[in-house]
Image: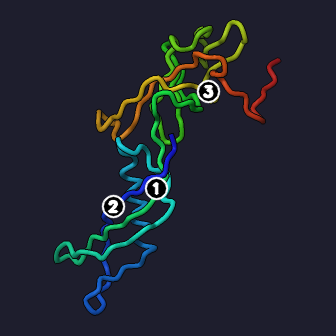
């Protein structure tokens, strides 16, 4: 689900000091805020941070220590994406295995569509493996866009090399779910 949330973050900057006032260029603060959000990537509460949509307020800075850096509380609106059970989404297949396919949906890299949730599809083991629907002859393989429903979502704070990510389980059980034909993607099989 895409939403817009109001957030506050403390942005660290080295300000100029003018008559006891801590001055810093707002453009620098926004750039630093965006860099901080890029590094933070996502939160369990709000999901993935996609874009800062508006800047609401920059409060007065507080000097941190003798280094001269200060912390500026910045209030802003941010567009986020958080997967929710029951969402209908589109993802691109990036890995195919006998157990199912892995999909990417924007910033979300860990979506799994198990073979058990692909009714009518069978695994075809070739150099480039794929799933084939015996009735419609539809194929699901790497690079294919799939329309699916979210069955389960989990938040991964940190495990191994994965940090601050969502993982989800998908299904294409239903009339309108499955591979999507997009304009310009038709291939001629001879």
Evaluate if marks 3 and 2 touch, with contact meaning CB atoms under 8 Å apart: no
Label 3 to label 1, Cα distance in Å?
28 Å
x, y percent for residue 48: 44, 45
Taking the view exactly as shown, the residue that stands out farthest to the left is 66
Evaluate if marks 3 and 1 touch, with contact meaning CB atoms under 8 Å apart: no
Secondary structure type for disc 3: strand
Classify 130 as above or below 11. Answer: above
Which numbered disc, 3 or 2, marks the residue that appears first in the sequence? 2
x, y percent for residue 6: 41, 57
Badge number at residue 9:
2
Badge number at residue 78:
1
Label 2 to label 1, Cα distance in Å?
11 Å
Badge number at residue 146:
3
Left or right of 121 in this view: 164: left
The local crowd at label 1, few if under 14, some if 14 to 19, many if 20 or more residues have their Cα within 10 Å, is many
Secondary structure type for disc 2: strand
Evaluate if marks 2 and 1 touch, with contact meaning CB atoms under 8 Å apart: no
Left or right of 188 in this view: 111: left
Label 3 to label 2, Cα distance in Å?
36 Å
Classify 5 as above or below 115. Answer: below
Residue in the image at 47% along x and 23% along y: 151
Q: Nearer the viewer, residue 104 or 74?
A: 74
| Quarter where residue 120 is shown | top right
x, y percent for residue 162: 35, 36
């Amino acid at each position: 689900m895409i939403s817009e949330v109001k957030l506050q973050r403390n942005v660290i900057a080295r300000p100029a000091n003018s008559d006891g006032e801590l001055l810093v260029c707002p453009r620098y603060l926004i750039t630093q805020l965006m860099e901080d959000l890029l590094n933070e990537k996502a939160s369990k509460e709000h999901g993935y941070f996609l874009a800062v949509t508006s800047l609401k307020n920059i409060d007065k800075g507080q000097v941190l220590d003798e280094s001269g850096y200060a912390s500026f509380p910045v209030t802003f609106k941010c567009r986020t994406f958080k997967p929710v059970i029951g969402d209908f989404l589109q993802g691109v297949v990036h890995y195919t295995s006998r157990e199912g396919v892995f999909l990417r949906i924007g910033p979300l890299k860990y979506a799994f569509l198990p073979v058990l949730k692909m009714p009518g599809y069978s695994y075809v083991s070739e150099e480039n493996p794929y799933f084939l629907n015996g009735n419609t002859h539809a194929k699901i393989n790497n690079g294919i866009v799939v329309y699916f429903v979210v069955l389960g979502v989990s938040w991964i704070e940190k495990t191994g090399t994965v940090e601050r990510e969502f993982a989800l389980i998908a299904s294409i059980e239903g009339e309108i779910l499955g591979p999507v034909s997009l304009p310009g993607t038709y291939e001629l099989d001879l």
